[in-house]
Image (cartoon, grey):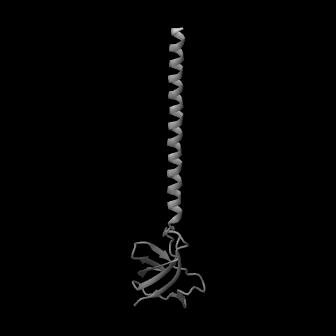
Amino acid sequence: MKKSIKTIRAMMAVGVMLVGTFWLGSVVSNQTVDAQKETEAKGMAQPKESCPEKRIMSGNYYDYMVIETVDGNEWLLDDAEGSKYIEYGTAVFEDGELVQVVFDTKGTEAVTDDETVEVRSIN
C-alpha cells in the first residue's frame, strides 16, 4: 500500500509538471503571436516610402552620344534616325558641354533600370 501511494504521488507530480509545461508553452506562444500581430499592425499603419517617378541630374556630354552624370554613371543617347539629339548627322551637344538629364526611375531605387527622358544644355 505504501508503494502505491508513493507511485500515485509521483504520477501526480509528473502530471502537474506536464500540465504546467503545456500551459506555460501555450502562454509563451500566445505572447509571440500577439507580438507578431502588433508588429504587423505597426507596419501597416506607416506608409512605405515611394520612389519618385523622375530623377534629375547634371553631367557632361563627351565623346559620341555619351553623358557622364555627377554620380559617375555613363548614359548613351539615342543616335537613331530622327533622334532629337542629332541634327544634320551630328550631335546637338559639344564635347564637354554641361547638360541636365531627366530620368524615368520606373518607380525603383535602382539606377541601372532608369531611362533617359530628356537632355538639355545648361550652358
Which of 108 and 78 lies nearest the eye of the viewer?
108
Q: Determine the residue located farthest toward the top in the rendered image.
A: 1
Q: Residue at x 50, y 61 (%)?
A: 42
Which of 8 and 85 lies nearest the eye of the viewer?
8
User: Image height check: is 14 above or below 65?
Assistant: above
Left or right: 82 in relation to 73 = right
Q: Residue at x 52, y 43 (%)?
A: 29
Which of 67 and 2 lies nearest the eye of the viewer?
2
Quarter of the image that includes the N terminus:
top right
- Rendered location of residue 3, percent (x, y): 52, 9
Quarter of the image that includes the C terminus:
bottom left
- Rendered location of residue 122, percent (x, y): 41, 89
- Rendered location of residue 24, percent (x, y): 50, 37
Which of 8 and 96 lies nearest the eye of the viewer?
8
Q: Residue at x 54, y 11 (%)?
A: 4
User: Image height check: is 8 above or below 98?
Assistant: above
Left or right: 23 in relation to 96 = right
Q: What number of labels is visible? A: 0
User: Image height check: is 85 above or below 33?
Assistant: below
Left or right: 81 in relation to 103 = right
